[in-house]
Amino acid sequence: MRSRGVDALVVAVAAVDAAVALWDEGGASPVTVVLAALACAALAVRRRFPLAVFLLALPATLASDLVFAPFAALFTLAERARDRRPSALCALLFALAAVLPWPPGDVSPGERTWTAVNFFYTLATAASPVLLGQLVQARRDLRRRLAEIEEAREHERLLHAQRVLARERAQLAREMHDVVSHQVSLIAVQAGALQIAAKDPGTREGARTIRALSVDTLDELRHMVALLRVSGGRTTELTPQPTLTDLDRLVAAGGIEAELTGALPADLGAPAQRAVYRCVQEALTNVRKHAPGATAAVRLWHDPDACGVTVTNAPATRPVLPLPGSGHGLVGLRERAEMLGGVLEAGPAMDGGYRVRMRIPHDTRRSAGN
């Protein structure tokens, strides 16, 4: 609604400018009036067809002293087009149209000199809306990029907190395994020896009970150690880790235009599913950080020997600003793949984008999940 109001105001101002120009000329021809009216009316669609609107306003500039309509079209073209050459060429055409005599005729040497000086002044004037439009475009891109940088930094802080928590939990798991598990195992061994050596039935029963409780404790301890070794980001509870069923939500909430295709075998182990999920997560994060405005394609695949995921993104469509990063994301993904006997490949694509591919062999994906 706001843009429509602005368009209506621009058309109204252009109509006033055209009316003043035609009034100063005195007896304007019907053709000149029609050209001026078309130039003013076309400004209503200048956001969608800025170049066509400018070209439509150019004949009116030749026939009269119309200024606002071509300037508005020049501003919109410079503000929306990424290529600056059309804007510069249109500014040159406007300057030529404004100073060349119409209709063409003989021009004296003095008039030629004055025309050349007037051309450079008019060209400098026409450069004003072009530069202003490029300034507005740069400001809009910078505002969008700053928002993306803030989102990327927040995501980076979250990932850092998750990595710190994962290290702490892994250290705690090692301590539990090395100390507590060892002591409980000794208790179970001693209780088993006492059960065999004792002659009193009550003593043997007590030893049997101690040994059974020790074995149960060891089983639960191993389960807790396995949970602590799983990378997590919540401090309140040991939440289930992401699986392949969470990929749709991850891709949809990635903040970029991405498409998920393909499927993986139903018997894929939990560690392999987590590795695929983290691969997609890290790849989409890198697209947001290093290829703003790019689209991405996430393809799940499997063949007789292996399965995996390939994430490919197109080149950036908006300016890329330098953004600090730890550089550990792809290293961690490569370590995950190697733990499963697989490989991770990452590098530039042929179309100028980037490609990340994780491959997991079949003979490890099942055993890893058991």
Image (cartoon, rainbow, N blue to C red):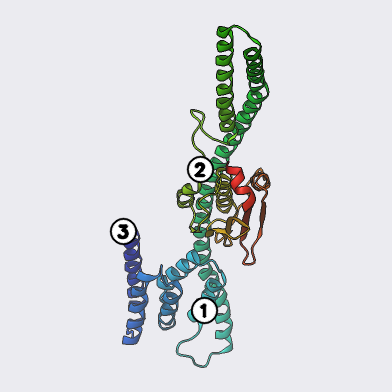
Q: Are marks 3 and 1 in contact (CB under 8 Å)?
A: no
Give the residue at mark 2.
242
Give the residue at mark 3.
1
Q: Nearer the viewer, residue 328 or 170?
A: 170
Q: Nearer the viewer, residue 93 or 193?
A: 193
Nearer the viewer's eye, disc 3 or disc 1? 3
Q: Answer with the quarter of the image where residue 11 lies.
A: bottom left
Give the residue at mark 1.
93
Counting from the top left corner in percent of width and height, residue 115 is at: 55, 81
Q: Residue furthest bottom?
A: 106
Q: Amino acid at mark 3?
A: Met
Q: Amino acid at mark 2?
A: Pro
User: Does residue 201 sit above or below 140 in this rendering?
Assistant: above
Q: Residues within 10 Å of mark 3 (few under 14, many from 20)?
A: few
Circle 3: element type: loop
Counting from the top left corner in percent of width and height, residue 324 is at: 64, 45
Counting from the top left corner in percent of width and height, residue 269 is at: 56, 45
Circle 1: element type: helix
